[in-house]
Image: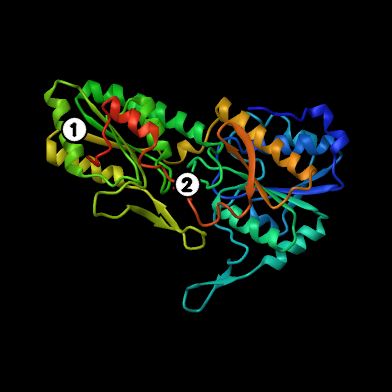
Amino acid sequence: MAVTTTYSSLASTCPAVRRIGILTGGGDCPGLNAVIRAVCRDAFHCGIRVVGIEDGYLGLIENRCRLLEERDVSGILTIGGTILGSNNKSNPQRHKVGTGPDGKPIYKDVLDDCLNTIRQHGIEALVTIGGDGTHTAAALFARLGVPVIGVPKTIDNDIMGTDITFGFQSAVATATLALDQVRTTADSHHRAMVVEVMGRNAGWIALHAGVASGSDVILIPEMPFAIEAVCERVRDRAKRGKRSSIICVSEGARFKGGQQVVARRVETSPDPIRLGGIAKMLAEQIEDETGVESRYTILGHTQRGGTPVAADRVLGTLLGSHAMTLLRQGKVGRMVAIHGSQLADVDLATPAGKQRLVSTDDPLILAARNVGTIFGDE
Ligand code: F6P
């Protein structure tokens, strides 16, 4: 990936903007701190002050901000989570302000409160690091005249407008390790092991971790599966003397003709559905149908935590630095992105209300089929 601007050449291109705000919204993921560090170091070098906004848009709504200093971003590159805190429930257009006599939440548009916070702290431009929900709100601020640059993040890798998001590769590494680890017990006990990974409606984590671990079955939301095909594979493997079967299932996967399994609803969240639980149903059905002892493991938030892999630290640094390059050029209202192996930028509203899903003719699906993995759609 070609990066033409060197750190020492920045001073000559520093913009008139003297103070920016930065926030991390949505679910956390490994690599957020790498972006914060890259933005801050670049800004400090240009004499730009950086206001850290706490807990995503909630910090703007509640006026919780602090000036970041060099020491705040020192040593954070390798640390997961976000030093600013995050929030995947706050929506400035629909903020919960109380509960009515009927027990139902009362919502209010608090965009003005956010704009007041921005003015009060002298913030001249915003860097928003987040997923589709964060960028939907960011595009709104841009329309209201706030210069904004977005940076896409999520373990799900499902943001429209960029080919990859940071956090994804760390989640895949965690999921792959877990799949590798259950295999030894599965082999020892002649079991089928079902491992459920995150990803919302996108099967990227399941597809990549499934291929990396050599899973026998990969089930993704984009390809509803027939339980009989899964059971047939488990039965067949047992018959051929294989000691185990590993099934990697995405939390958003569903039986043919069935619905996704919803674990809970978070009503105040821009996307209230929280998926989860398909692994238990699958393991029970596999055991009933095949007689092969089956267990399930739901990896959950282990995939969002921990130390970012090197690739996510690199990607976070690249995207954070590119956000500042665009800001210095006055090219705002954009989201930084990766297209192929190149740094790029797209309209900030590109991800709003959309998801970048796995295409059923993705080359990795073909490769997986060619090495004998099934997707249950056969
Ligand atoms: O979008 C990231 C993600 O981890 C999804 O993979 C998952 O469905 C969801 O967030 C879980 O959200 P929460 O942290 O609110 O349970």
Q: Residue at the location (74% across, 48% down)?
A: 331
Residue with the most extreme bottom position: 101
Asked if residue 344 is positioned above or below residue 108 in the image, the reply reads above
**Dot 2 corresponds to which residue?**
356
Please tell me whether mark 2 sits on a helix, a strand or a loop: loop
Q: Say left or right for 331 vs 89.
A: right
**Dot 1 corresponds to which residue?**
233
As drawn, the label of residue 180 is: none
Q: Residue at the location (22% across, 31% down)?
A: 192
Foreground: disc 2 or disc 1: 2
Residue 53 in the image: state x and y as whole percent: 71, 50
Which comes before the other along the chain, label 2 or label 1?
1
Asked if residue 349 is positioned above or below residue 79 in the image, the reply reads below
- Disc 1 crowd rating (10 Å Cα; few below 14, some 14-19, many 20+) is some
Cα distance in 3D space between marks 2 and 1: 29 Å
| Three-letter code, disc 2 | Arg
| Three-letter code, disc 1 | Arg
Which quarter of the picture shows residue 290? top left
Asked if residue 200 is positioned above or below residue 210 in the image, the reply reads below
Q: Residue at the location (25% across, 49% down)?
A: 255
Q: Is the CB of mark 1 within 8 Å of ligand 1?
A: no
Q: Say left or right for 252 vs 316.
A: left
**Quarter of the rendering occupied by the N terminus:** top right
- Disc 2 crowd rating (10 Å Cα; few below 14, some 14-19, many 20+) is some
Which quarter of the picture shows residue 60? bottom right
Residue 38 in the image: state x and y as whole percent: 71, 35
